[in-house]
Image (cartoon, grey):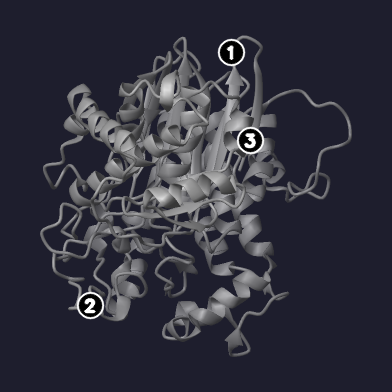
Amino acid sequence: MLARHCSRRRALRLAGLSAAAPFLLPAADRPAPFHGVLSGEPTAEKVAARVLADGGNFVDALVAGALAGAVAAPHQTGIGGYGASIILARADGKRVVCIDANSAAPAAARPDMFKPDAKGTVPGRVNETGWLAAGVPGILAGLQLALDRHGTRSFRELVAPAIQVARDGFKVSDGMAKTFASFASLAKSHEGGRKLFFKDGVPLAAGDTYRNLEVAALLETLAQRNSVDSFYRGDLAQRIAESFQKYGGLVTAKDLASYQAREVEPLRMEWNGIDLRTAPLTAGGLTTFQALTTLRELDWGRAGDLKPPSISAIHARLEALRLAWADRLALLGDPQHADIPVAKLLSADYAKESAAKVRHAVQAGKVLAHAATSRDHTGTINLSVADKAGNLAAITLTHGNSFGARVTVDGLGLTLGHGMSRFDPHPGHPNCPGPDKRPLHNMVPTLLLRDGRPVLAIGGRGGRKIPNALFEVLTRHVGLGESLEAALAAPRPHTEGNLHLELEAKWPAAEAEALAKLGYKVTTAGSATLSAAAFNPQTGEARAAMR
Protein backbone atom coordinates (compact mmCIF):
# COMPACT_ATOMS: atom_id res chain seq x y z
CA MET A 1 0.00 0.00 0.00
CA LEU A 2 1.25 3.50 -0.77
CA ALA A 3 1.97 5.75 2.17
CA ARG A 4 -0.44 8.66 2.20
CA HIS A 5 -0.29 11.79 4.28
CA CYS A 6 -2.82 14.58 4.43
CA SER A 7 -2.09 17.97 5.92
CA ARG A 8 -5.02 19.83 7.46
CA ARG A 9 -4.40 22.65 4.99
CA ARG A 10 -4.76 20.33 1.99
CA ALA A 11 -7.88 18.67 3.40
CA LEU A 12 -9.47 22.07 3.99
CA ARG A 13 -8.58 23.16 0.47
CA LEU A 14 -10.14 20.09 -1.11
CA ALA A 15 -13.21 20.32 1.09
CA GLY A 16 -13.63 23.99 0.24
CA LEU A 17 -13.82 24.86 3.91
CA SER A 18 -11.50 27.85 3.67
CA ALA A 19 -13.09 31.15 2.82
CA ALA A 20 -10.62 31.72 -0.01
CA ALA A 21 -11.39 28.59 -1.98
CA PRO A 22 -14.88 27.08 -1.52
CA PHE A 23 -14.96 23.99 -3.74
CA LEU A 24 -18.37 24.80 -5.22
CA LEU A 25 -17.16 28.10 -6.69
CA PRO A 26 -15.64 28.31 -10.20
CA ALA A 27 -11.98 29.02 -10.74
CA ALA A 28 -10.86 32.48 -11.85
CA ASP A 29 -11.57 33.40 -15.47
CA ARG A 30 -8.19 32.59 -16.93
CA PRO A 31 -6.72 29.70 -18.95
CA ALA A 32 -6.02 26.82 -16.60
CA PRO A 33 -3.49 24.02 -17.06
CA PHE A 34 -4.93 20.63 -17.92
CA HIS A 35 -5.18 18.28 -14.96
CA GLY A 36 -7.84 15.82 -16.16
CA VAL A 37 -11.59 15.49 -16.58
CA LEU A 38 -14.46 13.73 -14.84
CA SER A 39 -18.07 13.55 -16.02
CA GLY A 40 -21.26 12.18 -14.51
CA GLU A 41 -22.64 14.27 -11.61
CA PRO A 42 -22.25 18.03 -11.02
CA THR A 43 -20.94 18.01 -7.45
CA ALA A 44 -18.64 15.07 -8.17
CA GLU A 45 -17.25 16.90 -11.19
CA LYS A 46 -16.33 19.97 -9.11
CA VAL A 47 -14.76 17.90 -6.35
CA ALA A 48 -12.77 15.76 -8.79
CA ALA A 49 -11.50 18.83 -10.62
CA ARG A 50 -10.05 20.18 -7.38
CA VAL A 51 -8.43 16.83 -6.52
CA LEU A 52 -6.85 16.59 -9.97
CA ALA A 53 -5.65 20.20 -9.82
CA ASP A 54 -4.07 19.47 -6.44
CA GLY A 55 -2.03 16.65 -7.93
CA GLY A 56 -4.27 13.67 -7.23
CA ASN A 57 -4.49 10.87 -9.76
CA PHE A 58 -7.50 9.36 -11.51
CA VAL A 59 -8.49 7.08 -8.63
CA ASP A 60 -8.11 9.86 -6.06
CA ALA A 61 -10.49 11.99 -8.16
CA LEU A 62 -12.86 9.08 -8.67
CA VAL A 63 -13.07 8.26 -4.95
CA ALA A 64 -13.52 11.87 -3.83
CA GLY A 65 -16.09 12.47 -6.58
CA ALA A 66 -18.00 9.30 -5.75
CA LEU A 67 -18.16 10.11 -2.04
CA ALA A 68 -19.38 13.66 -2.67
CA GLY A 69 -21.77 12.58 -5.41
CA ALA A 70 -23.22 9.90 -3.16
CA VAL A 71 -24.15 12.58 -0.63
CA ALA A 72 -25.29 15.16 -3.19
CA ALA A 73 -27.57 12.75 -5.09
CA PRO A 74 -29.25 10.81 -2.24
CA HIS A 75 -32.15 9.64 -4.40
CA GLN A 76 -29.76 7.97 -6.85
CA THR A 77 -27.13 6.54 -4.55
CA GLY A 78 -25.49 7.00 -1.17
CA ILE A 79 -22.73 5.64 1.01
CA GLY A 80 -25.29 3.03 2.08
CA GLY A 81 -26.16 2.30 -1.56
CA TYR A 82 -26.17 -1.35 -2.38
CA GLY A 83 -23.19 -1.53 -4.70
CA ALA A 84 -20.59 -0.17 -7.06
CA SER A 85 -18.72 -1.47 -10.08
CA ILE A 86 -15.36 0.01 -11.11
CA ILE A 87 -13.05 -0.45 -14.11
CA LEU A 88 -9.66 1.23 -14.40
CA ALA A 89 -6.64 1.19 -16.68
CA ARG A 90 -3.16 2.59 -16.33
CA ALA A 91 -1.98 4.81 -19.16
CA ASP A 92 0.31 2.15 -20.61
CA GLY A 93 -2.61 -0.29 -20.90
CA LYS A 94 -0.64 -3.07 -19.22
CA ARG A 95 -3.06 -3.30 -16.32
CA VAL A 96 -6.82 -3.18 -16.69
CA VAL A 97 -8.78 -4.32 -13.64
CA CYS A 98 -12.27 -4.21 -12.22
CA ILE A 99 -13.49 -3.90 -8.65
CA ASP A 100 -16.67 -5.75 -7.70
CA ALA A 101 -18.38 -3.95 -4.82
CA ASN A 102 -21.82 -5.42 -5.39
CA SER A 103 -24.12 -6.06 -2.45
CA ALA A 104 -24.04 -9.50 -0.82
CA ALA A 105 -27.11 -11.26 0.53
CA PRO A 106 -27.09 -12.04 4.26
CA ALA A 107 -26.37 -15.56 5.50
CA ALA A 108 -30.06 -15.93 6.39
CA ALA A 109 -31.23 -15.34 2.80
CA ARG A 110 -33.27 -18.18 1.28
CA PRO A 111 -34.13 -18.98 -2.36
CA ASP A 112 -37.86 -18.76 -1.58
CA MET A 113 -37.79 -15.64 0.62
CA PHE A 114 -39.45 -13.53 -2.09
CA LYS A 115 -41.48 -16.27 -3.75
CA PRO A 116 -44.15 -14.62 -5.95
CA ASP A 117 -47.84 -15.22 -5.46
CA ALA A 118 -50.20 -16.68 -8.08
CA LYS A 119 -50.18 -13.35 -9.93
CA GLY A 120 -46.39 -13.30 -10.09
CA THR A 121 -46.09 -10.50 -7.52
CA VAL A 122 -43.90 -10.59 -4.43
CA PRO A 123 -46.33 -10.12 -1.50
CA GLY A 124 -45.95 -6.63 -0.09
CA ARG A 125 -43.10 -5.98 -2.55
CA VAL A 126 -40.79 -6.62 0.39
CA ASN A 127 -37.93 -7.31 -2.01
CA GLU A 128 -38.08 -3.67 -3.17
CA THR A 129 -38.75 -1.56 -0.07
CA GLY A 130 -38.19 -2.17 3.61
CA TRP A 131 -35.49 -3.88 5.64
CA LEU A 132 -35.66 -7.24 3.83
CA ALA A 133 -34.81 -5.45 0.56
CA ALA A 134 -31.37 -4.40 1.85
CA GLY A 135 -28.29 -6.60 1.76
CA VAL A 136 -24.75 -5.71 2.80
CA PRO A 137 -23.83 -2.30 1.27
CA GLY A 138 -20.70 -2.54 -0.88
CA ILE A 139 -19.89 1.01 -2.02
CA LEU A 140 -17.53 2.08 0.78
CA ALA A 141 -15.59 -1.17 0.62
CA GLY A 142 -15.13 -0.77 -3.13
CA LEU A 143 -13.89 2.80 -2.83
CA GLN A 144 -11.45 1.84 -0.09
CA LEU A 145 -10.07 -1.05 -2.15
CA ALA A 146 -9.63 1.17 -5.21
CA LEU A 147 -7.85 3.79 -3.13
CA ASP A 148 -5.60 1.32 -1.34
CA ARG A 149 -4.41 -0.34 -4.53
CA HIS A 150 -4.47 2.46 -7.09
CA GLY A 151 -4.73 5.84 -5.37
CA THR A 152 -2.14 8.21 -3.93
CA ARG A 153 -4.09 10.17 -1.30
CA SER A 154 -5.61 9.29 2.05
CA PHE A 155 -9.26 8.48 2.65
CA ARG A 156 -9.23 11.21 5.29
CA GLU A 157 -8.38 13.81 2.68
CA LEU A 158 -10.72 12.60 -0.05
CA VAL A 159 -13.84 12.31 2.12
CA ALA A 160 -13.63 15.95 3.30
CA PRO A 161 -15.76 17.41 0.45
CA ALA A 162 -18.50 14.83 1.05
CA ILE A 163 -18.61 15.82 4.71
CA GLN A 164 -19.12 19.45 3.72
CA VAL A 165 -21.94 18.56 1.31
CA ALA A 166 -23.71 16.48 3.98
CA ARG A 167 -23.35 19.26 6.56
CA ASP A 168 -24.34 22.19 4.33
CA GLY A 169 -27.14 20.41 2.49
CA PHE A 170 -29.11 21.66 -0.51
CA LYS A 171 -32.61 22.71 -1.52
CA VAL A 172 -35.18 19.97 -2.11
CA SER A 173 -36.49 19.89 -5.69
CA ASP A 174 -40.12 19.33 -6.67
CA GLY A 175 -39.35 15.81 -7.84
CA MET A 176 -37.50 14.88 -4.68
CA ALA A 177 -40.32 16.28 -2.53
CA LYS A 178 -42.82 14.07 -4.36
CA THR A 179 -40.56 11.07 -3.76
CA PHE A 180 -40.38 11.84 -0.03
CA ALA A 181 -44.18 11.96 0.11
CA SER A 182 -44.44 8.63 -1.71
CA PHE A 183 -42.62 6.72 1.04
CA ALA A 184 -43.53 8.86 4.03
CA SER A 185 -45.35 6.07 5.85
CA LEU A 186 -42.36 3.74 5.54
CA ALA A 187 -39.89 6.47 6.53
CA LYS A 188 -42.00 7.28 9.62
CA SER A 189 -41.78 3.66 10.79
CA HIS A 190 -38.22 4.03 12.09
CA GLU A 191 -36.22 6.68 13.89
CA GLY A 192 -33.66 7.18 11.11
CA GLY A 193 -36.32 7.94 8.53
CA ARG A 194 -38.23 10.31 10.81
CA LYS A 195 -35.10 12.39 11.41
CA LEU A 196 -33.92 12.53 7.80
CA PHE A 197 -37.03 12.98 5.68
CA PHE A 198 -39.39 14.99 7.90
CA LYS A 199 -39.65 18.55 9.20
CA ASP A 200 -42.17 19.36 11.94
CA GLY A 201 -43.82 15.98 11.41
CA VAL A 202 -44.41 16.31 7.67
CA PRO A 203 -42.24 15.18 4.72
CA LEU A 204 -39.69 17.70 3.47
CA ALA A 205 -41.22 19.95 0.81
CA ALA A 206 -39.79 21.61 -2.28
CA GLY A 207 -37.54 24.47 -1.21
CA ASP A 208 -36.71 22.97 2.20
CA THR A 209 -33.05 22.30 2.93
CA TYR A 210 -32.05 18.65 2.95
CA ARG A 211 -29.12 18.05 5.28
CA ASN A 212 -27.71 14.82 6.60
CA LEU A 213 -25.81 15.76 9.73
CA GLU A 214 -25.70 12.14 10.91
CA VAL A 215 -23.99 11.02 7.70
CA ALA A 216 -21.61 13.97 8.10
CA ALA A 217 -20.75 12.69 11.59
CA LEU A 218 -20.40 9.12 10.29
CA LEU A 219 -18.01 10.25 7.56
CA GLU A 220 -16.07 12.38 10.06
CA THR A 221 -15.58 9.28 12.20
CA LEU A 222 -14.30 7.34 9.18
CA ALA A 223 -12.05 10.29 8.30
CA GLN A 224 -10.55 10.31 11.78
CA ARG A 225 -9.85 6.60 11.43
CA ASN A 226 -8.68 7.09 7.83
CA SER A 227 -10.51 3.96 6.75
CA VAL A 228 -13.98 2.51 6.20
CA ASP A 229 -13.07 -0.69 8.07
CA SER A 230 -15.23 0.04 11.13
CA PHE A 231 -18.26 0.39 8.85
CA TYR A 232 -17.91 -3.36 8.30
CA ARG A 233 -15.98 -4.57 11.35
CA GLY A 234 -16.38 -2.47 14.47
CA ASP A 235 -18.68 -0.16 16.37
CA LEU A 236 -20.36 1.31 13.30
CA ALA A 237 -21.05 -2.15 11.90
CA GLN A 238 -22.66 -3.10 15.19
CA ARG A 239 -24.99 -0.09 15.03
CA ILE A 240 -25.98 -0.94 11.46
CA ALA A 241 -26.70 -4.54 12.44
CA GLU A 242 -28.78 -3.40 15.42
CA SER A 243 -31.12 -1.43 13.15
CA PHE A 244 -31.55 -4.44 10.89
CA GLN A 245 -32.41 -6.60 13.88
CA LYS A 246 -34.73 -3.99 15.42
CA TYR A 247 -36.82 -3.57 12.27
CA GLY A 248 -36.95 -7.13 10.94
CA GLY A 249 -34.02 -7.13 8.50
CA LEU A 250 -31.63 -10.02 8.03
CA VAL A 251 -28.16 -8.46 7.83
CA THR A 252 -26.05 -9.19 10.93
CA ALA A 253 -22.73 -7.95 12.26
CA LYS A 254 -21.22 -11.20 11.01
CA ASP A 255 -22.56 -10.55 7.49
CA LEU A 256 -20.95 -7.10 7.50
CA ALA A 257 -17.65 -8.46 8.84
CA SER A 258 -17.43 -11.15 6.17
CA TYR A 259 -18.02 -8.73 3.27
CA GLN A 260 -15.12 -7.99 0.92
CA ALA A 261 -14.95 -5.93 -2.24
CA ARG A 262 -12.76 -7.79 -4.71
CA GLU A 263 -10.51 -7.07 -7.65
CA VAL A 264 -11.53 -9.11 -10.69
CA GLU A 265 -10.54 -9.47 -14.35
CA PRO A 266 -12.68 -7.66 -16.92
CA LEU A 267 -14.44 -9.31 -19.82
CA ARG A 268 -12.70 -8.63 -23.12
CA MET A 269 -13.55 -8.51 -26.82
CA GLU A 270 -12.11 -6.95 -29.98
CA TRP A 271 -14.01 -5.25 -32.79
CA ASN A 272 -12.62 -3.24 -35.68
CA GLY A 273 -9.21 -2.97 -34.06
CA ILE A 274 -10.56 -1.67 -30.73
CA ASP A 275 -9.94 -3.60 -27.52
CA LEU A 276 -13.07 -3.44 -25.34
CA ARG A 277 -13.13 -4.31 -21.63
CA THR A 278 -16.10 -4.34 -19.26
CA ALA A 279 -16.89 -5.44 -15.73
CA PRO A 280 -17.69 -9.17 -15.44
CA LEU A 281 -20.68 -10.79 -13.75
CA THR A 282 -22.53 -9.91 -11.73
CA ALA A 283 -22.31 -6.64 -13.71
CA GLY A 284 -24.31 -6.06 -16.89
CA GLY A 285 -21.57 -5.84 -19.52
CA LEU A 286 -21.80 -9.49 -20.54
CA THR A 287 -25.15 -8.75 -22.18
CA THR A 288 -23.72 -5.80 -24.12
CA PHE A 289 -20.71 -7.80 -25.29
CA GLN A 290 -22.82 -10.81 -26.26
CA ALA A 291 -24.96 -8.66 -28.54
CA LEU A 292 -21.85 -7.00 -30.02
CA THR A 293 -20.25 -10.37 -30.83
CA THR A 294 -23.37 -11.31 -32.78
CA LEU A 295 -23.12 -8.12 -34.83
CA ARG A 296 -19.42 -8.70 -35.39
CA GLU A 297 -20.17 -12.19 -36.69
CA LEU A 298 -22.80 -10.73 -39.05
CA ASP A 299 -20.21 -8.25 -40.38
CA TRP A 300 -22.84 -5.73 -39.44
CA GLY A 301 -22.53 -2.17 -40.71
CA ARG A 302 -20.01 -2.84 -43.46
CA ALA A 303 -21.96 -3.61 -46.60
CA GLY A 304 -25.17 -4.98 -48.10
CA ASP A 305 -28.52 -5.03 -46.35
CA LEU A 306 -26.95 -4.79 -42.87
CA LYS A 307 -25.41 -1.40 -43.54
CA PRO A 308 -27.25 1.48 -41.83
CA PRO A 309 -29.59 3.22 -42.22
CA SER A 310 -31.49 0.28 -43.72
CA ILE A 311 -34.38 -1.22 -41.75
CA SER A 312 -32.62 -4.59 -42.04
CA ALA A 313 -29.61 -3.17 -40.19
CA ILE A 314 -31.84 -1.84 -37.40
CA HIS A 315 -33.80 -5.10 -37.30
CA ALA A 316 -30.58 -7.11 -36.93
CA ARG A 317 -29.35 -4.84 -34.15
CA LEU A 318 -32.58 -5.26 -32.19
CA GLU A 319 -32.69 -9.02 -32.59
CA ALA A 320 -29.07 -9.35 -31.43
CA LEU A 321 -30.07 -7.42 -28.30
CA ARG A 322 -33.23 -9.48 -27.79
CA LEU A 323 -31.26 -12.73 -27.93
CA ALA A 324 -28.74 -11.43 -25.40
CA TRP A 325 -31.52 -10.29 -23.07
CA ALA A 326 -33.34 -13.61 -23.32
CA ASP A 327 -30.14 -15.34 -22.20
CA ARG A 328 -29.50 -12.72 -19.52
CA LEU A 329 -32.86 -13.15 -17.83
CA ALA A 330 -32.85 -16.96 -18.07
CA LEU A 331 -29.21 -17.93 -17.46
CA LEU A 332 -27.24 -15.29 -15.59
CA GLY A 333 -26.49 -14.95 -11.88
CA ASP A 334 -23.56 -15.02 -9.47
CA PRO A 335 -20.92 -17.32 -11.04
CA GLN A 336 -19.57 -18.16 -7.58
CA HIS A 337 -22.90 -19.73 -6.63
CA ALA A 338 -24.27 -21.11 -9.91
CA ASP A 339 -22.98 -22.64 -13.14
CA ILE A 340 -23.15 -19.67 -15.52
CA PRO A 341 -22.12 -20.29 -19.18
CA VAL A 342 -20.07 -17.11 -19.58
CA ALA A 343 -17.49 -18.61 -21.94
CA LYS A 344 -20.19 -20.14 -24.14
CA LEU A 345 -22.18 -16.89 -24.42
CA LEU A 346 -19.11 -14.99 -25.62
CA SER A 347 -17.70 -17.79 -27.80
CA ALA A 348 -17.25 -17.68 -31.57
CA ASP A 349 -19.50 -20.73 -31.99
CA TYR A 350 -22.35 -19.14 -30.06
CA ALA A 351 -21.93 -15.90 -31.99
CA LYS A 352 -22.31 -17.86 -35.23
CA GLU A 353 -25.41 -19.60 -33.89
CA SER A 354 -26.94 -16.30 -32.80
CA ALA A 355 -25.97 -14.56 -36.04
CA ALA A 356 -27.69 -17.29 -38.04
CA LYS A 357 -30.90 -16.78 -36.08
CA VAL A 358 -30.75 -13.04 -36.57
CA ARG A 359 -29.99 -13.37 -40.29
CA HIS A 360 -32.95 -15.72 -40.76
CA ALA A 361 -35.29 -13.36 -38.91
CA VAL A 362 -34.15 -10.39 -40.99
CA GLN A 363 -34.48 -12.24 -44.27
CA ALA A 364 -37.95 -13.48 -43.32
CA GLY A 365 -39.03 -10.03 -42.12
CA LYS A 366 -40.05 -11.47 -38.76
CA VAL A 367 -39.14 -11.17 -35.10
CA LEU A 368 -37.69 -14.00 -33.04
CA ALA A 369 -40.17 -15.72 -30.74
CA HIS A 370 -39.21 -15.67 -27.10
CA ALA A 371 -40.63 -14.13 -23.94
CA ALA A 372 -39.03 -11.96 -21.28
CA THR A 373 -40.27 -9.81 -18.41
CA SER A 374 -39.58 -6.07 -18.32
CA ARG A 375 -38.89 -4.34 -15.03
CA ASP A 376 -38.27 -0.74 -13.99
CA HIS A 377 -34.85 -0.06 -12.50
CA THR A 378 -33.61 3.47 -11.80
CA GLY A 379 -31.48 5.37 -9.28
CA THR A 380 -27.77 5.38 -10.17
CA ILE A 381 -24.84 7.66 -11.00
CA ASN A 382 -21.81 6.96 -13.18
CA LEU A 383 -18.52 8.83 -13.09
CA SER A 384 -15.85 8.54 -15.80
CA VAL A 385 -12.41 10.08 -15.35
CA ALA A 386 -9.17 10.69 -17.24
CA ASP A 387 -6.15 12.26 -15.55
CA LYS A 388 -3.30 14.18 -17.18
CA ALA A 389 -1.15 11.03 -17.37
CA GLY A 390 -3.77 9.20 -19.47
CA ASN A 391 -5.02 6.89 -16.74
CA LEU A 392 -8.75 6.18 -17.19
CA ALA A 393 -11.49 4.77 -14.98
CA ALA A 394 -15.26 4.56 -14.61
CA ILE A 395 -17.40 3.82 -11.58
CA THR A 396 -21.12 3.17 -11.36
CA LEU A 397 -22.70 3.31 -7.91
CA THR A 398 -26.32 2.87 -6.99
CA HIS A 399 -29.13 2.63 -4.49
CA GLY A 400 -31.21 0.64 -6.99
CA ASN A 401 -34.46 2.53 -7.46
CA SER A 402 -34.98 6.00 -5.99
CA PHE A 403 -33.78 5.99 -2.35
CA GLY A 404 -33.26 2.24 -2.58
CA ALA A 405 -34.91 0.26 0.21
CA ARG A 406 -36.19 3.57 1.67
CA VAL A 407 -35.06 2.72 5.18
CA THR A 408 -32.41 4.55 7.23
CA VAL A 409 -30.15 3.25 10.00
CA ASP A 410 -30.99 4.89 13.33
CA GLY A 411 -28.47 7.50 14.41
CA LEU A 412 -26.27 7.22 11.31
CA GLY A 413 -28.41 8.86 8.61
CA LEU A 414 -27.54 5.90 6.41
CA THR A 415 -30.25 5.20 3.81
CA LEU A 416 -29.85 1.69 2.45
CA GLY A 417 -29.94 0.48 -1.14
CA HIS A 418 -32.20 -2.40 -2.16
CA GLY A 419 -29.70 -4.85 -3.57
CA MET A 420 -31.98 -7.78 -2.72
CA SER A 421 -34.48 -6.51 -5.30
CA ARG A 422 -31.97 -7.38 -8.04
CA PHE A 423 -32.40 -11.09 -7.35
CA ASP A 424 -34.97 -13.05 -9.33
CA PRO A 425 -37.70 -13.99 -6.82
CA HIS A 426 -38.32 -17.43 -8.35
CA PRO A 427 -36.60 -20.25 -6.41
CA GLY A 428 -34.31 -22.29 -8.60
CA HIS A 429 -33.39 -19.43 -10.94
CA PRO A 430 -29.60 -18.86 -11.24
CA ASN A 431 -30.20 -15.37 -9.87
CA CYS A 432 -32.48 -16.30 -6.97
CA PRO A 433 -31.49 -15.19 -3.44
CA GLY A 434 -29.12 -17.26 -1.34
CA PRO A 435 -26.55 -16.87 1.45
CA ASP A 436 -23.70 -14.53 0.46
CA LYS A 437 -24.86 -14.40 -3.19
CA ARG A 438 -24.41 -11.23 -5.21
CA PRO A 439 -27.35 -10.26 -7.42
CA LEU A 440 -27.25 -9.65 -11.15
CA HIS A 441 -27.21 -5.89 -11.76
CA ASN A 442 -27.15 -3.42 -14.64
CA MET A 443 -23.94 -1.45 -14.06
CA VAL A 444 -21.57 -1.56 -17.05
CA PRO A 445 -18.41 0.53 -16.51
CA THR A 446 -16.40 -0.05 -19.69
CA LEU A 447 -13.02 0.90 -21.19
CA LEU A 448 -11.79 1.08 -24.77
CA LEU A 449 -8.13 0.69 -25.72
CA ARG A 450 -6.52 1.49 -29.07
CA ASP A 451 -2.99 0.29 -29.87
CA GLY A 452 -2.70 -0.92 -26.29
CA ARG A 453 -3.50 2.45 -24.71
CA PRO A 454 -6.76 3.36 -22.93
CA VAL A 455 -8.72 5.99 -24.86
CA LEU A 456 -12.24 5.95 -23.41
CA ALA A 457 -13.94 5.28 -20.08
CA ILE A 458 -17.74 5.11 -20.17
CA GLY A 459 -20.70 3.95 -18.12
CA GLY A 460 -24.27 4.95 -17.38
CA ARG A 461 -27.22 5.45 -15.11
CA GLY A 462 -30.75 4.27 -15.86
CA GLY A 463 -31.25 0.73 -14.57
CA ARG A 464 -31.96 -1.93 -17.16
CA LYS A 465 -31.56 0.65 -19.90
CA ILE A 466 -27.82 1.00 -19.22
CA PRO A 467 -26.54 -2.12 -21.09
CA ASN A 468 -28.61 -1.23 -24.16
CA ALA A 469 -27.56 2.42 -24.19
CA LEU A 470 -23.93 1.34 -24.05
CA PHE A 471 -24.57 -1.20 -26.81
CA GLU A 472 -25.99 1.51 -29.05
CA VAL A 473 -23.09 3.91 -28.48
CA LEU A 474 -20.46 1.20 -29.00
CA THR A 475 -22.27 -0.02 -32.12
CA ARG A 476 -21.95 3.44 -33.60
CA HIS A 477 -18.56 4.48 -32.20
CA VAL A 478 -16.71 1.17 -32.65
CA GLY A 479 -18.84 -0.59 -35.27
CA LEU A 480 -19.43 2.37 -37.59
CA GLY A 481 -16.52 4.61 -36.63
CA GLU A 482 -18.69 7.57 -35.64
CA SER A 483 -17.25 10.17 -33.27
CA LEU A 484 -18.02 9.75 -29.60
CA GLU A 485 -20.15 12.87 -29.65
CA ALA A 486 -22.19 11.68 -32.66
CA ALA A 487 -22.63 8.22 -31.15
CA LEU A 488 -23.87 9.69 -27.87
CA ALA A 489 -26.24 12.09 -29.64
CA ALA A 490 -27.95 9.43 -31.77
CA PRO A 491 -31.42 8.24 -30.63
CA ARG A 492 -31.41 4.89 -28.82
CA PRO A 493 -33.71 1.87 -28.65
CA HIS A 494 -34.48 -0.24 -25.61
CA THR A 495 -35.62 -3.85 -25.42
CA GLU A 496 -35.48 -6.46 -22.68
CA GLY A 497 -35.98 -9.44 -24.92
CA ASN A 498 -39.74 -9.27 -25.43
CA LEU A 499 -41.58 -7.46 -28.22
CA HIS A 500 -41.94 -4.20 -26.30
CA LEU A 501 -39.61 -1.73 -27.99
CA GLU A 502 -38.95 1.74 -26.62
CA LEU A 503 -37.54 4.38 -28.94
CA GLU A 504 -36.35 7.84 -27.99
CA ALA A 505 -38.45 10.73 -29.28
CA LYS A 506 -35.82 11.70 -31.86
CA TRP A 507 -36.10 8.33 -33.59
CA PRO A 508 -37.25 8.81 -37.24
CA ALA A 509 -41.01 8.25 -37.49
CA ALA A 510 -40.76 6.28 -40.74
CA GLU A 511 -38.35 3.81 -39.15
CA ALA A 512 -40.55 3.45 -36.06
CA GLU A 513 -43.52 2.66 -38.29
CA ALA A 514 -41.51 0.07 -40.23
CA LEU A 515 -40.43 -1.62 -36.99
CA ALA A 516 -44.03 -1.73 -35.78
CA LYS A 517 -45.00 -3.51 -39.01
CA LEU A 518 -42.36 -6.16 -38.26
CA GLY A 519 -44.18 -6.97 -35.02
CA TYR A 520 -42.55 -4.80 -32.36
CA LYS A 521 -44.83 -3.01 -29.90
CA VAL A 522 -43.31 0.43 -30.29
CA THR A 523 -43.58 3.18 -27.66
CA THR A 524 -41.65 6.39 -27.01
CA ALA A 525 -39.48 6.61 -23.88
CA GLY A 526 -36.17 7.96 -22.67
CA SER A 527 -32.87 6.11 -22.52
CA ALA A 528 -30.16 5.74 -19.91
CA THR A 529 -27.67 8.59 -19.45
CA LEU A 530 -24.08 7.74 -20.33
CA SER A 531 -21.06 9.70 -19.09
CA ALA A 532 -17.66 9.34 -20.70
CA ALA A 533 -14.07 10.55 -20.44
CA ALA A 534 -11.87 10.26 -23.53
CA PHE A 535 -8.09 10.66 -23.77
CA ASN A 536 -5.86 11.04 -26.83
CA PRO A 537 -2.44 9.50 -26.06
CA GLN A 538 -0.85 11.28 -29.03
CA THR A 539 -1.84 14.80 -28.06
CA GLY A 540 -2.40 14.39 -24.32
CA GLU A 541 -5.82 15.96 -24.71
CA ALA A 542 -8.90 14.76 -22.83
CA ARG A 543 -12.57 15.58 -23.05
CA ALA A 544 -15.73 14.70 -21.18
CA ALA A 545 -19.07 13.88 -22.76
CA MET A 546 -22.45 12.96 -21.36
CA ARG A 547 -25.94 12.08 -22.61
Residue 489: quarter of image: top right
Q: Is residue 389 above or below residue 468?
A: above
Closest to the camera, between mark 2 and mark 1, is: 2
Look at the numbered discs 1 and 3 and tell me whether their residues touch, using CB distance below 8 Å. no
Look at the numbered discs 2 and 1 and tell me whether their residues touch, using CB distance below 8 Å. no
Q: Which mark is residue 119?
A: 2
Where residue 462 appears, as percent x and y from the top left, is 48, 53
Q: Disc 1 and disc 3: Cα gap in Å?
A: 18 Å
Q: Which mark is residue 537?
A: 1
Is residue 435 visible to us here?
yes
Q: Earlier in the sequence, mark 2 or mark 1?
A: 2
Where residue 373 appears, as percent x and y from the top left, is 29, 60
Residue furthest bottom as drawn: 201
Helix, strand or loop at mark 3: strand
Mark 2 neighbour density, 10 Å: few (under 14) some (14–19) many (20 or more):
few
- Is 374 placed left or right of 357 in the picture? right
Residue furthest right as drawn: 29
Q: Which mark is residue 545?
A: 3
Label 3 is placed on what type of residue?
Ala
